[in-house]
Amino acid sequence: MLDRTIIGILISAIAFVTVYVITPSLINALTKRNMVVKDYNKEVPTMVARPGGPSILAGILASELTLYAFFPSTEILAIIITTSLAFLVGLVDDRKVLGGWFKPLALAASAIPIILLGVYVPHLAFPLFGMVKIPELYLALIIFIIPIMGNTINSIDVLNGVASGFMTIASFALTLCLVIVHNYDVALASLPLGFVSLAFYKYHKVPSKIFPGDSGALTLGAMYGTLSIVGHVEIIAAIALLPAVINSFLFLSSVKRVIEHRQIKANPVVHTEDFKLMASTDKSAPVTLVRLILSHGPMTEKQVGFVIFKLALFSAALAIITSFMMGIKI
Amino acid sequence: MKGTPIFFYIFVMWLLIIAGGGLLVSIIAPISINGFGKLDHLIDSIVKAGIAMMLVVLWILILSKIKNWIFHKQISH
């Protein structure tokens, strides 16, 4: 246990320091190459570097490879390979605008190493009622989980700091849940995700100096999804992501098809004269989490972000309660 | 408090997940289909997967109704 604690501290430090140190250089390199996008929520026209995915992946790889050197396991290999493939899918999407179905299909292919390495248990565990064996169905579930988690995180990346801050909360909640269900090895492997998100938040928070882009958001989401599979905590992981799930659900149920956010014709959020965010009155605009939060009145970008973080903390608490409920059978 | 209906919606979703899990584990999983020889296992899996998918659709419909009920005022603004 002492070994695991020391290694846990080491890989957490590697994950945090790698992203913390690399990201400023990445911002400079992206800015020099004019790889910047407009931040539409700023009164003064502001260009922000994108994508931050490379520094996020660097932090994950540095820490997970260190962990693999101490505790070689196929679970860590699956995390590394699937996360890297998801990063590549995101990077392609960052560089070239692709159709709405490209990402789900390419991310589904990223999940194949999990199946090939056999790092899953084909049972779905539910709180209070035990588990259900679904050998054939579980393979389909793996293929679905990675695109869903990836796109769910990507869909919440709408305001400065939200995706990285949300992932920080959800990841640390997942680590705690894995400890509660006594899955210490995967809990250890999940630590870098929280620390990478936290370090990236430093540069992503209001006012953002860098955006994660699809490569960053999909990397975070795919790693989270892989951890939920190899850690056998699929339901718990989904509960910790509920605010982001609601965002995707509201969006899909209002537009009624799979499309990219850039394809939306009516913006769900508009600006007041003092450049606060305000819910759009356009009935054709999709319903999103941010639009619902703003239905009470205009708020600053930072205030909306904090409401989302409160929702993330609430979901994290529900996920932790669910973890304790896993040990109870009725 | 701002966002209170959303907290309530998350709580309802959580309850639905637990209830759905209970339904799957207690009622659907124990169903056993026999009489098809070697195809027993396959047909059993297909039937259970079909029921699970119907439950997912039902779950989405319930969520959609609850969403309209909880957020009616906000959405109509």
Image (tube, rainbow, N blue to C red):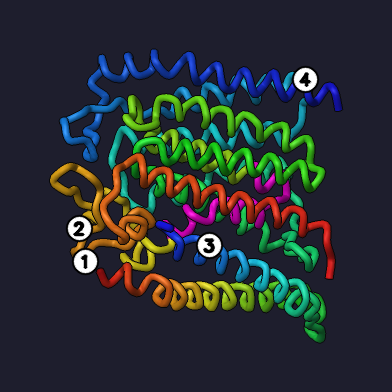
Task: Residue A2: give x, y in percent of width and height.
Answer: 85, 23
Which residues are the magenta region? A227-248
The residues bearing labels 1 and 3 have C-alpha atoms spaced at a distance of 25 Å
Quarter of the image where the C terminus of chain A is located: bottom right
Q: Are marks 3 and 4 in contact (CB under 8 Å)?
A: no
Q: Secondary structure at mark 1?
A: loop
Q: Secondary structure at mark 2?
A: loop
Q: Secondary structure at mark 4?
A: helix
Using the rendered image, report if marks 1 and 4 lie on a common chain: yes
Q: Secondary structure at mark 3?
A: helix
Give the amino acid type for the residue marked by disc 3 in the picture: Ile
Residue mark closest to the camera, 1 vs 3: 3
Q: Which mark is residue B10?
A: 3
Task: Residue A16: give x, y in percent of width and height.
Answer: 56, 21
Give the amino acid type for the residue marked by disc 1 in the picture: Ser
Chain under callout 4 = A
Q: Earlier in the sequence, mark 1 or mark 4?
A: 4
Residue that carries the numbered disc 2 in the rendered image: A266
Task: Residue A52: give x, y in percent of width and height.
Answer: 40, 27
Give the amino acid type for the residue marked by disc 2 in the picture: Ala
Give the amino acid type for the residue marked by disc 4 in the picture: Ile
Residue that carries the numbered disc 1 in the rendered image: A284
Chain under callout 2 = A
Residue that carries the numbered disc 4 in the rendered image: A6
